Image (cartoon, rainbow, N blue to C red):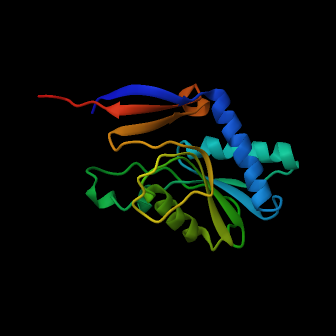
Amino acid sequence: MKLIEKTQIMDKDAMRRALTRIAHEIIERNNGVENLCFIGIRSRGVPLAERLTRKVKEIEGKDLPIGVVDITLHRDDLALSSGQPVVSHTDVSFPVSGKTVILVDDVLFTGRTTRAALDAIFELGRPASIQLAVLVDRGHRELPIRPDYVGKNVPTSLKEIVSVYVGEIDKEDKVIIQEIADEKL
């Protein structure tokens, strides 16, 4: 599959501003940070969750627990894939039962990744609530899942892909839209 870069929709500063706004919204909606924890969906949801946790600490002066969830074994398309799945590990070293979990991902598309993450979290305990924070919501939901916090809403076509790059993994911060090229035989 060949991808053609169409446009950059967020740069480093836009990403920073969006995460700062989301951090403020999380604090406001929850009347502070008591009983909050953050869980990032591997892979790019993790550095975004780390950044949000740091922003909340800058604002409120409190360290909050942060964990990582790997959804590989919770995917609904696992049986359809060929070969062995590559499984990382879930790392949540605190109890989630009774907590308000802020689940963080980079892009919300069909909702299937979020559904898988919810399954993984419920294996760890019974949170008081789970709120979803995403950097980009691109639409095209297949499941009744809606984010509580959104950095940017970006209407897309099904031929487009939203790619998030984070410095911790990709050595730069940006969000781009790519289009799947029609390959003629």
Front residue (pair 111, 44) = 111
Q: Residue furthest front?
A: 155
Determine whether, in the image, residue 74 is placed left or right of residue 29.
left
Q: Residue at x 71, y 62 (%)?
A: 94
Percent of width and height locating residue 178: 40, 31
Instruction: Please identify the quarter of the rendering in which residue 69 is found.
Output: bottom right
**Which of these two is toward me, 89 or 102?**
102
The quadrant holding residue 142 is: bottom left
The quadrant of the picture occupied by the N terminus is top left
Residue 162 location, quadrant: top left
Quarter of the picture holding the C terminus:
top left
Q: 18 or 115: nearer the eye?
A: 18
Residue at 45% over, 58% down: 111
Number of numbered callouts drawn: 0
- Camera-nearest residue between 27 and 79: 27
Say if 70 sits above or below 8 in the image: below
**In the image as oriented, which residue stretches furthest toward the right?**
61
Residue 138: percent from left, percent from top:
47, 46
Residue 151 horizontal/vertical position (percent) = 62, 44
Which residue: 72% across, 58% down?
Answer: 37
In the image, taking residue 171 as reference, residue 25 lies left or right, namely right
Q: Is residue 99 above or below residue 1?
A: below
* Residue 12 rendering spot, x and y as whole percentages: 63, 28
* Left or right: residue 84 compared with residue 60: left
- Asked if 57 appears above or below 185 in the picture, the reply is below
